[in-house]
Image: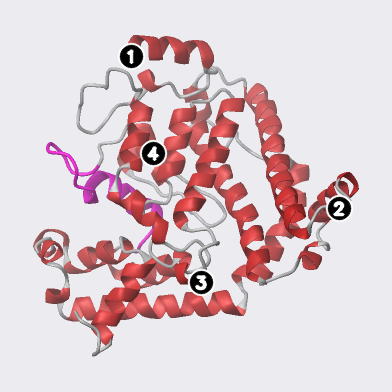
Amino acid sequence: MLSQDLIKEAENKLLAPYAMKSHESRGRAYPEKEHPYRSAYQRDRDRIIHCAAFRRLEYKTQVFVIHEGDYYRTRLTHTLEVAQIARTIAAALRLNVDLAEAIALAHDLGHTPFGHAGEEVLNEIMLPFGGFNHNLQGYRVVTLLEEKYPNFSGLNLTWELREGIVKHSSLYDKASFIKELAPDEMPTLETQVVDIADEIAYDNHDLDDGLTSGLFKDYDLEKLAIWQALCSKISKEYSTLSEQKKKYLIIRSLIDLQVTDLIKETEVKIKEFNLSSCLDAKKLNQKVVAFSKKLLEAREPLRDFLKEKMYNHYRVARMSNKAKRFIKELFCVYAEKPRQLPPDHQILIPERGKEKVICDYIAGMTDRYALDEYKKLFDPREKV
């Protein structure tokens, strides 16, 4: 049977010197005996998958609110796509695939209902009380809010997993800092992989969802050099391909192009910085996992296109503004009369403060639950 000694031996043999090995972890906040045949990061991954916050991602908005249609990505399907891309990149770079996957699965645990609109309005409301950031909320979920174990609150994840949640950063995510998680250090290379995997996932699935929803058409994308180049290549190879299959093939090719470029450029940087341990990467003043300059320039028009045609589209703006009103009104109603909160939340107010308890409650809601609560509290015909 696989043992911790064999796991250690396999990691030392297969992983690169700059990868984060599980037996070199800084450990857990509450000491636990390690599992006989799972590494520390495999155990982290399993705890994340089995937690309530992870399941609720199925009914949280990515871009489209869930009742807009069953096809579109949710926060859960986005998370799974990030994990798949992160695993591929980490394996190619001989990094710790289990750690990268676990960070990817956990990176959005603190997200609110209704996507970034929910986060923005909660941050506005909570500014007098420290604001709101979904990375820090994710940290709060895994260290306090999940209640599954007899000897501690939270999931008692490894130091590296908690660091990966807090320091996660991308175009739409700002890295946060907590004193005990070495704020002056760069995150592990595995965390850096997840950051880019997140960007690759949402850029490309937003293209898919945007085309499917009709927010823009394929001919709009033909103005983009990176799209047009792949479109021309695929059209030559498959002259009778349907438009639907062509769309899928272009998006798959676009993901492959970005992943391949990232791996090659990161390998160059690893040699350039002469990394010989995971600590070498953490001591740098810049990230190692990165695209080439050429691809960054090619991606820029695509990201500008998505911002203009999708994220600023009037339908998306309507969904976002409506969501903000729901959350703001829910917060005000609970704050005015906290006895409307469930009893297990009311009892936490003396210890954690009214506003923080309400914020935790709303942030943990799914889109569907938030809409149901809104109906119960504001529609006189609804049962409460």
Circles 3 and 4, Cβ within 8 Å, touching? The answer is no
Q: Residue at x 34, y 45 (%)?
A: 178
Question: Quadrant where the C terminus lies?
Answer: bottom left
Name the spot of residue 355 as percent of width and height, x first: 22, 68
For discs 3 and 2, the disc positioned in front in the rendered view: 2
Mark 2, other Cα within 10 Å: few <14 / some 14–19 / many ≥20: few
Residue 64: % across, % down: 52, 67
Of circles 2 and 4, the one toward us is 2
Label of residue 163 in the image = 4
Nearer the observer, disc 3 or disc 4?
A: 3
Query: In the rendered structure, which disc, 3 or 4, sits on the residue that comes first in sequence?
Result: 3
Q: Position of 384 compared to 219: left or right?
A: left
What amino acid type is highlighted by mark number 4? Glu
Q: Cα distance, mark 1 to mark 2?
A: 54 Å
Instruction: Tell me the element at label 3.
Output: helix
Q: Tell me the distance, in whole angstroms, between the alpha carbons under discs 2 and 4.
A: 49 Å
Q: Is residue 253 left or right of residue 57?
A: right
Count the marks: how many?
A: 4
The quarter of the displayed image where residue 99 is located: top left
| Screen quadrant of the N terminus | top left
Residue 68 numbered mark, or none: 3
Q: Residues within 10 Å of mark 3 (few under 14, many from 20)?
A: few
| Residue 220, placed above or below residue 85 | below
| Magenta-highlighted residues | 131-154
Badge 3 amino acid = Glu
The spot of residue 254 in percent (x, y) is 72, 47
Q: To which residue does mark 1 refer?
A: 4
Residue positioned 17% across, 68% down in the render? 354
| Amino acid beneath label 2 | Thr
Task: Identify residue for label 2.
Answer: 240
Q: At x 57% / y 43%, what residue is drawn?
A: 197
